[in-house]
């Protein structure tokens, strides 16, 4: 995995983990809702304006003698909320509890993400070493089979020795493939924790599985 640094992967996870990001959004929403509830305690001010333009006839028989009136009217209103049996206070308290719960959730998921990213990175390093060790063991088992079969030809080994060596080869092959799958699973886990799992990663992993 690149970079070769556990702290760098932890930082990626804290910045890109989708579950953590969702919990942060929920916390921001709870904070916004609480702020909205608190503003209901305060008086609200409204401002209005209107414009009038009218013509009034002084005499019905004299249509061209008019009285024109124009004017702008401005209005200012203030609304003061009254105490309604403690309902608003209860809503504010509830909103505060929800915000506190959201903050605790963010803290919990942050710690879990940190730990999971660190464990996934270290686990991947362990599986890399395991894959390399099992690959060497597989190569040794193949050489052992060749050597045993050659020994049968010259009379120094028996058929039972060949069967035993082939059985060891099959076991080494199984262990090697298992370690590869474990490594792939760990890659997926690390990419998922950091929010970086993409279609390209899945296509690459799928190509490994067909080899």
Image (tube, grey):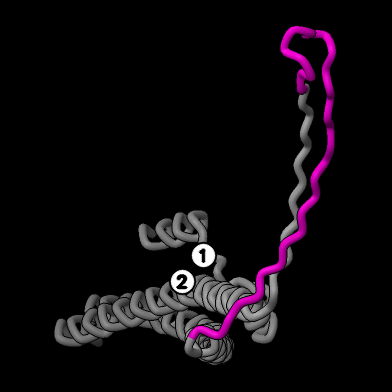
**Alpha-carbon neighbours of circle 2 within 10 Å: few (<14), some, or many (≥20)?**
some
Q: Position of residue 14 (x, y in %)?
A: 63, 79
Task: Give the left or right position of residue 19, taking residue 68 as reference.
Answer: left
Q: Is residue 205 above or below residue 131?
A: above
The answer to whether 164 is drawn above or below residue 55 in the figure is: below
Residue behind mark 2 = 188
Q: Position of 178 compared to 161: left or right? A: right
Q: Quadrant of the N terminus?
A: bottom right
Q: Quadrant of residue 99?
A: bottom right
Q: What element carries label 2?
A: helix
Q: Can the viewer see residue 123 in this picture?
A: no
For residue 45, side relative to residue 172 (left or right): right
**Is 79 a magenta residue?**
yes
Q: Does residue 189 appear to the left or right of 14 in the view shown? A: left
At x 20% / y 86%, what residue is drawn?
Answer: 164
Mark number displayed over residue 197: 1
Q: Can residue 166 be seen in this view?
A: yes
| 51 or 139, nearer to the observer | 51
Q: How far apart are marks 2 and 1 (CA)?
A: 7 Å
* Magenta stretch, residue numbers: 56-84
């Amino acid at each position: 995995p690149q970079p070769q640094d556990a702290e760098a992967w932890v930082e990626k996870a804290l910045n890109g983990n989708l579950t953590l990001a969702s919990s942060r959004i929920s916390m921001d929403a709870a904070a916004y809702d609480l702020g909205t509830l608190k503003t209901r305690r305060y008086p609200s001010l409204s401002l209005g304006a209107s414009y009038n333009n009218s013509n009034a006839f002084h005499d019905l028989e004299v249509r061209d003698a008019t009285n024109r009136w124009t004017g702008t009217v401005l209005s200012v209103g203030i609304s003061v909320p009254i105490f309604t049996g403690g309902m608003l206070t209860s809503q504010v308290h509830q909103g505060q509890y929800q915000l506190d719960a959201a903050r605790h959730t963010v803290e919990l998921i942050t710690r879990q993400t940190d730990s999971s990213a660190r464990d996934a990175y270290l686990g991947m390093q362990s599986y890399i070493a395991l894959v390399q060790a099992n690959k060497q063991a597989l190569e040794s088992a193949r050489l052992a089979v060749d050597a045993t079969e050659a020994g049968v030809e010259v009379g120094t080994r028996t058929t039972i020795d060949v069967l035993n060596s082939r059985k060891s080869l099959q076991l080494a092959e199984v262990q090697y493939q298992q370690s590869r799958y474990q490594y792939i699973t760990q890659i997926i886990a690390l990419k998922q924790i950091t929010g970086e799992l993409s279609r390209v990663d899945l296509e690459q992993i799928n190509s490994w599985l067909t080899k």
